[in-house]
Amino acid sequence: MHPASSPTADAPRDHRTPSRRGRRLRALVAAVVALPLVLGAAACGGEDNEASTDPNAPVELSIFWWGGEARANLTEQALALYTQKHPNVTFKKTWQANQGYFDKLATLTAGGDAPDIFQIDDNFLTEYASRNTTLDLTSYKDENKLDVTKFPESLWQYGVVDGKLAGIASGENTQGLVYNKTLLQKHNLPEPTTGMTWEAFISWAEQVSKTTGTPGTMDPSADYKAFWVWLRQQGKDLYKGKDLGFDEADVTRWFELWKGARDRGATPTADVIHEGNATDITKQLVVTGKAATSFVWVNQLPELKKNTKDELGVIAYPGDPSAQWARASMYWSVFRGTKHKDVAVDVLNFLSNDPEAGKILGTDRGLPSNLDVRKTVSDAVTDPAMKTSIQVETDLATKFGPSPQVPLKGHSKVRAELIKSAEEAQYNRQTPAQAAAAFLTACKSAIV
């Protein structure tokens, strides 16, 4: 699973904030991509352009994904197994590291050379679906040609955009609070527990700080994952329809919650918090020894463990765990203009549900979406940290609530703006109310 949570192939966790150059390139590509996509799909006959009715006719499918060499090797093995079972189907395989992947995908799509199958995440699924780039998989699901009956319901639903199934989850992940068990045991302190309130958690962190001299928790006010879960616990959401699902008062309350935690010494100082705001898993404060907890993805536990000699534990985020959901670590989508849509969907079904393919792919893209396949894969896992990660997510699955809607276009910008505004408050350059107002303005601009 480590490729999924490594700096070069970290799809199941937060993606890097795009570089300034990357943002400019994406903006330029986005400006020209929409019309060609619509016209290209129309020119290809929309969703009724299957190349041949002969099931044995030769088919070559292009497929594009991000990841490291380990993921590439596993994916190629699984695709080779599909070809072994369907000798007429071969693959033109392309992959690269996460950095620059979406710039390349946008360029390919705009240039009329979109791959038949491509990997995507929840930062961009809405954008591509809204441009009619992705094939609607709903009819395939309804006809059981794309079988999701063994998926957690909230997992496959997290691929629905405007009523259309735009992508199928290639793996599952959820939010996790990782804590330093060794530190707590050394000082005879209790471990945090799933279901404790945010206020109780901050009080616990304050006590950890006073007893151990290590700040009890990372300040997650800049972490969109934590903010999102907290919003859902307040009956709100990150997005609602085509708009934001929260208001300025909500953000102010969130920033004030963590200002109070900082004032009480439950968190590190602003300079250290800034270090933790970096997405690099190797710099999370729970493994650098600068905080007793970090807010991450559950599946990152094994990668975190590689960077510390201490024993780590993981639980749900504070508050009601039903605010969390079975999140797609990433998706497989099919290009709407493909000439081989039925075969492409069958490949997705194979990668999701075939037991042999599941054994090959393992947990590289997150926990297998098919629960039966997941059990088979889980039984074969020997790494203690991975076993803990799987067990926690399996336990949380019984507490998950319904999935939210897939983020709107501009989600990456919203995430970046939250970091910017939260840090203004963390450094006391702005009050929580001022930082909240600036964040809301930036968000509204980002999702237009």
Image (spheres, rainbow, N blue to C red):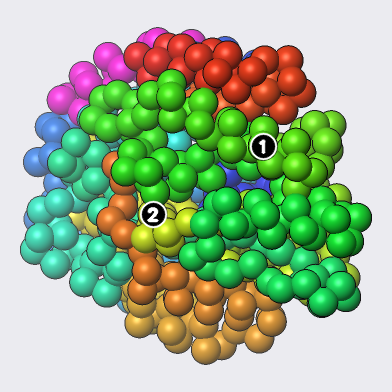
Q: Looking at the rendering, which quadrant does residue 22 occupy?
A: top right
* Residue drawn 14% across the image and 33% down it: 46
* Residue drawn 61% across the image and 77% down it: 388
Inspect the image, locate mark 2, and give the three-letter code of the amino acid beneath it. Ala
- The location of residue 16, given as percent across then percent down, is 63, 36
Q: Look at the image and tell me whether residue 158 can be seen.
A: yes
Name the foreground residue: 380 vs 97: 380
Q: Main secondary structure of the magenta part?
A: helix
Q: Is residue 374 magenta?
A: no
* Residue drawn 53% across the image and 79% down it: 391
> Residue 260's mark?
1
Q: Looking at the rendering, which quadrant does residue 400 occupy?
A: bottom left
- Badge 2 crowding class, 10 Å Cα cut-off, few under 14, some 14 to 19, many 20 or more, is many
> Relative to 227, does residue 108 appear above or below in the rendering?
above
The single residue placed furthest to the right in the displayed view is 213
Mark 2 or mark 1: which is in front? 1
Circle 2: element type: helix
The single residue placed furthest to the bottom in the displayed view is 379
Q: Magenta part of the protein: which range?
A: 28-43
